[in-house]
Amino acid sequence: MARRASSIATIVLGSLLPAFTAQATATFSWFDYQASDTTSQVEQGQFSNPILPGFYPDPSITRKDDTYYLVNSSFAYTPGLPIFESQDLVHWELAGHALNRPSQVTFENLNTSRGIFAPTIRYHDGLFYIITTAVDAGGNFIITAEDPAGPWSDPVWLPEVGGIDPDLFVDEDGRAYIAHNDAPPGEPLYDGHRAVWLWEIDLDTLKVKKDSRKLLINGGVDISKQPVWIEGPHIYRVNGWYYLTCAEGGTSVNHSQVVFRTRSLSEPFVPYENNPILTQRDRPQSDITSTGHADFIQTPQGDWWSVFLATRPYEGNHYNTGRETFILPLTWKEEWPHILPAGEPVPTTLPMPVGVATDKATFAERSRHFRDDFDSTALDPQWLGLNTFERGWAATEKSALTLQPVTTSLRNAEQSAFLGKRQQHMQFSASTQLEGAEPGTTAGLVVFQNRRYHYFLGVEQTDTQRIVFLEKVEDGKVTRLHETELNGSGALILRVENQEKTLQFSVKDVAGNKQMTIGEPQPATLVSTQSAGGFVGALIGLHARTSAGE
């Protein structure tokens, strides 16, 4: 699996790094991320929740034989649609990305939280399908692959299917259906009034059957109570029943998972009287919140599990790690699925399933330390770019990453020389060695939530001086919090330490072995989803821009 991830990275990035033109550049020799909290450290015989820490929202899962595959939303980041692979639902490996080339989709000029929403992955009759929405970038589409590691096809667009969060369900007779969120019939009755609709689709042609549209759910479980944001539908057939599960309440603290069932798709779905089957909104205080947007999977042995998103706030509803992927066993009671009893907290550790190896590191455990010495011609697949698959401004050679400035600012929606790695822990340190930036280039370390909310520890190089500064961008407004002039032109280590609520920046002169803090400790809440809005988590990144900016 690791070998496949590497080969995919080469496809995604290696072929998209053309030779540089003679322009000012910045060079980084390494990047290091180290967790300092204890959330992923568990006792023998257990594994930790979340199974995918960091910004891995809206999980969907499928199975081929005894291997499971999981996909997440990726919004405007590239490569998009990360796909994970596991044989036991505990140990996950990144198999590749389903979106890795510009012929598939474009995210040019999109805000960070637009782009790819809520995919569904399914396996049927030798083929893998992903159906998803490119918000403000073309709408709903399907892609296919024989191997989840790729290559994946170019999209087949579905102009008839509006809204977001499409699901693909293949019935026992081979007929296939798309369920999705869209506007309700008629005028909305209240803010957040949405509906779930159904279409039939021909899997041979991937064309929606005209005039097959049907209303499944109007509003939610009980429209008289004005439920909001019914979305993320998935349909299953179990023991003669059709089950429809959806998220309800919006993807924040009121998030929940609800379920309906019917004997026939031509008859109405009836809501479960004990809905919701998963929520944390009934808990006044919780380490884990916003649970919902679940998908179900059955093991070859007949057991059931559910993956879902949740968040880990550190102050109020502030969280920087984004919406993450969690897992819990699913049980059936009186032919209804149950994920978590009302009022119970989501467990942060779970017993290792019988027969699962306990001496192998999980994805969560491996995520505690990430180091890149840039000793490959292809960038590590953990690095994300903004808005574009083409990265001619980045090159790795001779154990160094070179960034060539594209814009004067990271704030505007134009493509920027920026690469980011997900923040996966509430306490961490991240550092990089900046070998140098040529005159006219500003480069450094970014703690990034979106273009309008981030911190930048930058080094500005001119012909006569070198200035290290700390910059805050809040609601699009730039404030230089601190700056100092440094002598010499040698390598610098730029560092940020996160202790839940604060971020402390520092710089070290490699030659003189002198370290200094840059500015006062800064509030981490600035780069939380709660403060900045949107649907993504924070990234720790490397950035270069022309010195004429800001």
Image (tube, rainbow, N blue to C red):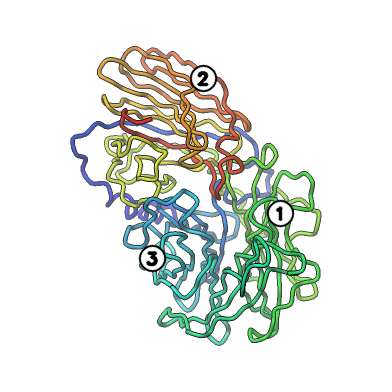
Q: Nearer the viewer, mark 2 or mark 3?
A: 2
Q: Secondary structure at mark 3?
A: loop
Q: CA distance from mark 2 to mark 3?
A: 46 Å
Horizontally, residue 29 falls left or right of residue 328, namely: left
Q: Nearer the viewer, residue 434 or 198?
A: 198
- In the rendered image, which residue does mark 2 sit on? 519
Q: Secondary structure at mark 1?
A: loop
Q: Position of residue 139 (x, y in %)?
A: 45, 66
Crowdedness of circle 1 by 10 Å Cα count: few (<14), some, many (20+)?
A: some
- In the rendered image, which residue does mark 1 sit on? 254
Q: Amino acid at mark 2?
A: Gly
Q: Amino acid at mark 3?
A: Trp
Q: CA distance from mark 3 to mark 1?
A: 36 Å
Q: CA distance from mark 2 to mark 1?
A: 37 Å
Q: Please identify the quadrant where the C terminus is shown.
A: top left
Q: Nearer the viewer, residue 253 or 297?
A: 253
Q: Please identify the quadrant where the N terminus is shown.
A: bottom left
Q: Residue furthest left?
A: 22
Q: Amino acid at mark 1?
A: Asn
Q: Residue furthest front?
A: 187
Q: Which mark is residue 138?
A: none
Residue placed at 80% from the left, 71% from the top? 273
Ranked by sequence position, the earlier of labels 2 and 3 is: 3
Q: Position of residue 312 (x, y in %)?
A: 65, 44
Residue placed at 31% from the left, 15% from the top? 465
Q: Nearer the viewer, mark 3 or mark 1?
A: 1
Residue 29 higher or lower than 377, as above or below:
above
Ranked by sequence position, the earlier of labels 3 and 1 is: 3
Q: Nearer the viewer, residue 145 or 387?
A: 387
- In the rendered image, which residue does mark 3 sit on? 152
Ranked by sequence position, the earlier of labels 2 and 1 is: 1
